Image (spheres, rainbow, N blue to C red):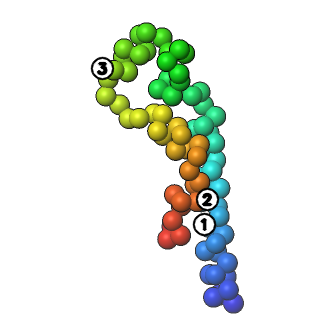
Amino acid sequence: LMVMALLMTIPWTWWHLYLEEIAKRHAHVMKQVPVACKDAAEVSLFQWLSSLYTVRTDECFEFHRNLLVDPMWDVPPTK
């Protein structure tokens, strides 16, 4: 009985972590599209110049990663 309970909790916990990761990704994607991901016609001159001279993480990469990569690959089975 204990072995069966253990075998049931492993996929159950993984599924819960998977759904939490999906929720995080949806929350991130539902925010406004970062300025770095917009077309050049949609970006103001000041925003374009500031993007040339500031060092920061690639917001566009993170946005598209959250949009396109399945969270299943971010939730390891060892968690």
Amino acid, disc 2 = Tyr
In front: 60, or 19? 60
Task: Tell me the quadrant of the picture where the N terminus can be found.
Answer: bottom right
Q: Position of residue 33 (x, y in %)?
A: 57, 28
Q: Residues within 10 Å of mark 2 (few under 14, many from 20)?
A: some
Q: Secondary structure at mark 1?
A: helix
Which of the marked residues, 2 or 3, is nearer the chain's N terminus? 2
Which disc number belongs to residue 53?
3
Amino acid, disc 3 = Tyr
Judged left or right of residue 56, residue 75 is right
Q: Secondary structure at mark 2?
A: helix
Reply above or below: 6 against 54.
below
Residue at point 45% right, 33% down?
59
Which disc number belongs to residue 22?
none
Residue at point 55% right, 44% down?
66
Reply above or below: 49 against 66.
above
Amino acid, disc 1 = Trp
